Amino acid sequence: MTSHMFGRGPGPLPTAVRGEGCYIYDSEGRAYLDGSGGAAVSCLGHSDADVRAAIHAQLDKIAFAHTGFFTSEPAEALADLLIAHAPEGIDKVYLLSGGSEAVEAAIKLARQYHLETGQPQRHKLIARRQSYHGNTLGALAAGGNAWRREKYAPLLVETHHIMPCFEYRERLEGESEWDFGQRAANALEEEILRQGPETVMAFIAEPVVGATAGAVPAVDGYFKRIRQICDQYGVLLILDEVMCGMGRTGHLFACEADGISPDIVTIAKGLGAGYAPIGAMLASSRVYEAIEQGSGSFQHGHTYHGHPLAAAAGHAVVNAIVTRNLCDRVKTQGDVLQAALHDTFGQHAHVGDLRGRGLFRGVELVEDRATKRPLDPARKLNARVKKAAMAEGLICYPAGGTVNGREGDHILLAPPFIITDDQIGELVGKLSRAVETALAQ
Ligand code: PLP
């Protein structure tokens, strides 16, 4: 029978009917090991009893109360919990329904901040190539991935993209890691000066780049220099932790590893762990107070933002991450995963790089290890790996365009934090077979 679902792409797809721990089961009874949490979402696996109970309990109290009229207990509790663990200076939480919404809100808040502080000429956003910030028009404009932007280019607002801090691809022969990081960060200063510092509103970056580059952390010193540059020129720093935040890299907020605090930070995905659609934009007290003491309110809002069921889910998830010490577990299991990847792919002729932090790992596939030459994009290797992995009973997140938006293939891995050593073995074994099948085609 023809499906009336307007799906993402070529179907048909299996029907997911049940989740248990790290596995999803389809209607035919097949099990899939969730090696990527979908897209870095399902951090607690698919059957967390506490999160389920929190949603049930909230549903029985009240499902919805419009945020124009009421606040709610779960929203207040979630905001308190996030702020108790947030980077220094971050003090307010604006709850939304996903990552793109959080990024849109962040961009608009940056603009309103400059209006409130008497700098109406500041409207330009600087971002990085090979980044992804979401699919709504503002977030898509911020993103620096060529193929995702291409079709919608005439609709996208002016954004300026600088080089990413992508060591494997961008560090020069003979350049130290530190010098590379400083050079990459100084590209921001050059761009600010090119645009005119008085016109630049904000810089947005993912602390660990996810979907479009495959788990690329910045090198040491990069974000400290970025923070200095933003401060020097009065540019707000927005960190997009939609994918890398909420424990994924072994820190509740990924930027802890970089030793800096942003002015605004966005989170989603792991915040709801797949149990509810939720995202959030968190702002520093400096940014919030400028609005409060200026026009009094942030000119934004959605009908469903701050939804009590989603907030109850988010609170139960963050509570689980904190009270079960899951960030420590992410570090340990992340090391186990990285070691297993090294054992299997470390000498593989078509694996150029194994990278990432915690349980956020990237495998970059290449034609030639020595020259880092990418595979011919016409081979669509990433799509083949995805298909072959599904046939093996493994969910992973391969993507193309790793090098420049058109060339390059990587596989993103982001399994649930509860993954065991045996399941890591299963993941890497299935992935290895899927890669060989795809390469043989
Ligand atoms: N920002 C980053 C860093 C992301 O990885 C994503 C999604 O992959 C988004 C924003 C958009 O989030 P959503 O798909 O929930 O709208």
Image: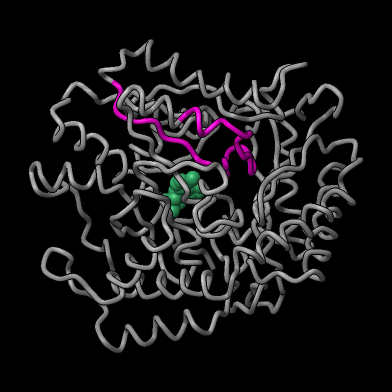
Image position of 38 with respect to 412: above or below: below
Q: Across the whole image, how many numbered discs are drawn on residues? A: 0
**Among the 4 quarters of the image, the one containing residue 136:** top left
At x 82%, y 71%, the residue is: 422
What percent of the width, then of the height, locates residue 67?
18, 65
Residue furthest to the left in view is 295
Image position of 371 with respect to 210: above or below: above
What percent of the width, then of the height, locates residue 91?
30, 54
At x 58%, y 51%, the residue is: 10
**Depth check, front residue: 287 or 441:** 287
What percent of the width, then of the height, locates residue 295?
7, 43
What percent of the width, then of the height, locates residue 222?
56, 30
At x 77%, y 30%, the residue is: 375
Image position of 61 with respect to 317: above or below: below
Which image quadrant: the N terminus? bottom right
At x 67%, y 66%, the residue is: 329
**Among the 4 quarters of the image, the one containing residue 122:** top left
Reply yes or no: does residue 129 show up in magenta.
no
Residue 230 falls left or right of residue 398:
left
Reply yes or no: does residue 223 show up in magenta.
yes
Residue furthest to the top in view is 194
Q: Is residue 434 visible?
A: yes
**Depth check, front residue: 115 or 149:** 115
Magenta stretch: give its range.
200-226
Q: Is residue 8 visible?
A: no
Colour pattern of the rendering = one colour
Image position of 306 with respect to 254: above or below: below
Which image quadrant: the C terminus? top right
Residue 40 falls left or right of residue 139:
right
Residue 145 falls left or right of residue 170:
left
